[in-house]
Amino acid sequence: MTKTTLQPFFSPDNIEQRSFEIIDSEVPEPRPFEGDEWTIARRLIHTTADFDLLNHIVIHPQAIAAGVEAIKNGCTIFTDTEMARSGIPPRRTSPFGCTTQCLLNRSDVVAKAQETGSTRAQAAMDAAAPEIGGSIMAIGNAPTALIRLMQHLEQGGTPPALIVGMPVGFVNAAESKEILLAQSSVPYITIRGRKGGSPLAAATVNALAILASTP
């Protein structure tokens, strides 16, 4: 029977730092992303232990600057799930005056979804529309939320500062992200194909908040 050798004890901060060191060592330079882009990509790998993400992450040239500036300006961060909202701790964003909201379970959103036969993610996006300007939209689960957001923009709606578009799954997830990539007016960070998820959307926002806190 093979004996498992455990790593020495690390504090929580050291565990994260050691994880980043391992990721850096397993993705030798030249890396597909550098600088602040690597900060984002590395945190996504850290969240999933999935190095294949490096083949699918797409970062708009203005995305990081737009996201960092929005956070510094105290933006609202809208998420499409409570999981994503919970994954963005206030200790990272509240020093800037940011708030993180998920409208999915709000009573008027639930009622509208039932009335119209739409998904709650779509109804939540409609409810957020008047406040989208200058926000960060972190979509990690529902393709219908990202599609509705893109429809909002196509109809002349006020754009957010940044779209973190990472819906996951087999039905319209990849397609919704291709719609996002096809537009050029709003900076975005996305993961092409079926991969994504609320933890990845939250991790992206956390990475941006860390960059905003860096002198």
Image (cartoon, helix red, strand yellow):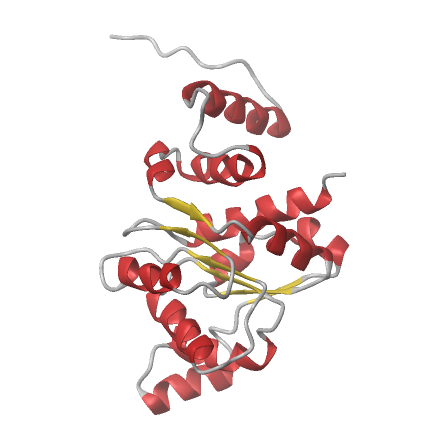
Query: Count the marks: how many?
Result: 0
Taking depth in this image into account, of 27 and 120 the one nearest to the observer is 27
User: Vertical placement of 179 versus 125: above or below?
Assistant: above
Whether residue 152 sits left or right of residue 193 in the image: it is right
Whether residue 48 sits left or right of residue 75 in the image: it is left
Residue 71 x %, y %: 67, 56
User: Vertical placement of 191 versus 178: above or below?
Assistant: above
Residue 166 x %, y %: 40, 55
Residue found at x 53% / y 68%: 102
| Quarter where residue 143 is shown | bottom left
| Quarter where residue 158 is shown | bottom right
User: Vertical placement of 213 versus 197: above or below?
Assistant: above
**Which quarter of the rendered picture does the N terminus lie within?**
top left
**Which quarter of the rendered picture does the C terminus lie within?**
top right
| Quarter where residue 184 is shown | bottom left
Whether residue 209 sits left or right of residue 180 in the image: it is right
Residue found at x 75% / y 61%: 97
Residue found at x 39% / y 63%: 180
Residue found at x 28% / y 51%: 193
Taking depth in this image into account, of 26 and 5 the one nearest to the observer is 26
User: Vertical placement of 162 versus 46: above or below?
Assistant: below
Residue 21 x %, y %: 53, 21
Taking depth in this image into account, of 58 and 98 the one nearest to the observer is 58
Residue 199 x %, y %: 45, 49
Taking depth in this image into account, of 84 and 190 the one nearest to the observer is 190
